[in-house]
Image: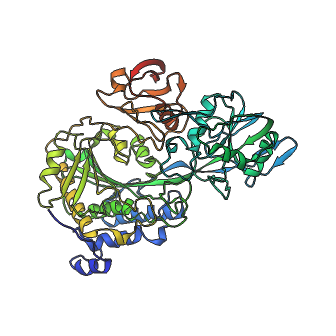
Amino acid sequence: MKKYLVFPVNIILLLSFACGRGYNPEICSEDLFDKLDFLAGDSLKGRYPGTPEDSILLHYLSGEFKKYGLELYNESGIQYFSFISSARAGNRNSLTIGQKKFQSGSDFIPLGFSSSDSLATPVIFAGYGFDIISDEFTRNDYQFVDPTGKWVMILRGNPENNNQSTKFTAFEDDRYKAMLAKDKGAAGVILISGNGYDPSDNLSELKESQVDIGIPCIQIKRNVADILFSSMGVTTDEVEKSLYKPGNVISPDLNTQIIAVTDIIHEKTRSGNVIAFLEGKDPEAKDEYILIGAHHDHLGYGGTGSSSREPDTNAIHYGADDNASGVAAILELAEKFTSLEPERSIAFVTFGAEEKGIIGSRYFTENPPIPINKIVMMINIDMVGRMKPDSSLQVNGVGTSAFSAEIVTKLNKPYNFNLKLSQAGYGPSDHASFYAKDKPVLFFTTGVHKDYHTTEDRIDSLNINALSDITSYIADIALHIANLDSRPMFTEAGPKSVDSRGYRGKITLGIMPDVSADDHKGVEVLGVTEGRPASLGGIKKGDVIIAIDGKPVGDIYEYMFRLGHLKAGDAVIVTILRNKEIIDLLVQL
């Protein structure tokens, strides 16, 4: 087994004397470093989709493909698409309590998952907004109040805010609490940050766009909450301290009318996929394509609302491994293949807005620049720059065609990677979009690490010599598949269910849900795993889940929320929309 050492960049450059500047069809460390130096450098500011730097990146990638002599898609090489990128407060936001009016942005703010609406109704207080029944404990903050048709005011966090291992962690998400309140009949939700949760009492930053839950939701400052609690003769701090006591629940009706208008403007921006083609040499086989892809976006400056693991840090997230490493590999592969003359054609694609929910690759498969049935295999490269000391390389999707595992294993002999093979075709990256279209996929990664989605994912932490070998290995595999006498046939393998993103429970139906739709029309089933509850209950690929156990499912968040309240062994009715017909199916969990 090869052992890889991480050398300082200047040593890599000295060791890579065989690589030349300009056109070079050989894959080598120096060329990879040159590409990485730009992709993960300061000038692109973290490659956030929809920014001026994103536009520079798109044209850079297109220019590189053109330099290698590839045919560019639509002459420019760029397949543009639009997506909802951010949210901001509109001009109509208002809050009135009694005769007093409050200022949006300083006294209160609409939350990212709020609907744009207006509501005038009394307010009740529901503690931390919990209704928990678990094997460990139970707690119901709604047991003494009826929230139907009212504003419900809730403390953020939990009674054990200073306890990192608290049992409340799975139940304290703001959106989760708001959806629970809505389920109980609340017409609107008001959140407060107690002193134990946030001594500075900061209002949430309305930055990232979120799918709204269908009712108005606002956050108010503690001094505003004090006015509401004055009818009880207490302050917010006193209420919070009383709830620290184990088992203490306070759920009073505050007998106060609140009038509020929430106004959120969702803003769209444009990004793109970069696409180039190399025509195959066989007159018949050249109509079929091997697609090699990697996403080129990252988190920009991170911050609150992003998927940064340092949400309080506003600084460049370089994304050297995630996924400048994959893009550099794509560029080297494109240059390499111009000297190989494969039988089938090759499509090289870098996808935009993957970090936003594989938006670019989904757009590609829904608006294919080449017939989707002509794609023989999709090879996805995502985070291949951090080879571990045991030389392990994960290759997922080997079960999606009959011979993939054999090919991947056979061609590894010169490299001697410690292969970690997975049958499943679904995963949290762009290959999932192609697997959903019944395409065989292979996904290459060296895996996550402590610097993932942080400011420390930098070029000086990459193992560039190992990245060079991985790129060469992928080239061997892609060329082998491109030259097969017959195309690999698709085999369903998986899928895995989507990550619950913080919601409680581990119940899954055994489907691959559409995570990107935001139109409140349900959750489309992109794939169904044989032998799992959904399959046994009659759910099929293409169905749209619109309710679970009689409660609506408008989007992926509501879907996960519903699953979080189910238990193994439950039998539930899943309502689906199939060919414009509404059908109730009984599913045994």
The structure residue drawn at horizontal position 47% and vertical position 41%, both measured from the top left corner, is 516
Residue 149 at what x, y percent from top left? 71, 28
Position in image of residue 66 (x %, y %): 35, 64
357 relative position to 123: left or right: left
Left or right, 83 with respect to 71, comes to: right
Q: Residue furthest right?
A: 99
In this rendering, the answer to whether 534 lies above or below 315 is above
Task: State the count of labels.
Answer: 0
Q: Which of 49 and 412 is in front in this view?
A: 412
Image quadrant holding the N terminus, namely: bottom left
Query: Residue 531: in sight, yes or no?
Result: yes
Task: Answer left or right for 230 relative to 192.
Answer: right
Quarter of the image with the C terminus is top left
In-front residue for pair 487/175: 175
Q: Which of 306 and 289 is in front in this view?
A: 306
Q: How is the image coloured?
A: rainbow
- Residue 92 shows in this picture: no
- Residue 235 at what x, y percent from top left? 76, 47
Query: What residue is drawn where x is 18% and y is 60%?
Result: 340
Residue 543 position by quadrant: top left
How far across and down, in percent of the image, does residue 107 sit? Answer: 75, 52
- Residue at 42 percent across and 66 percent down: it is 60
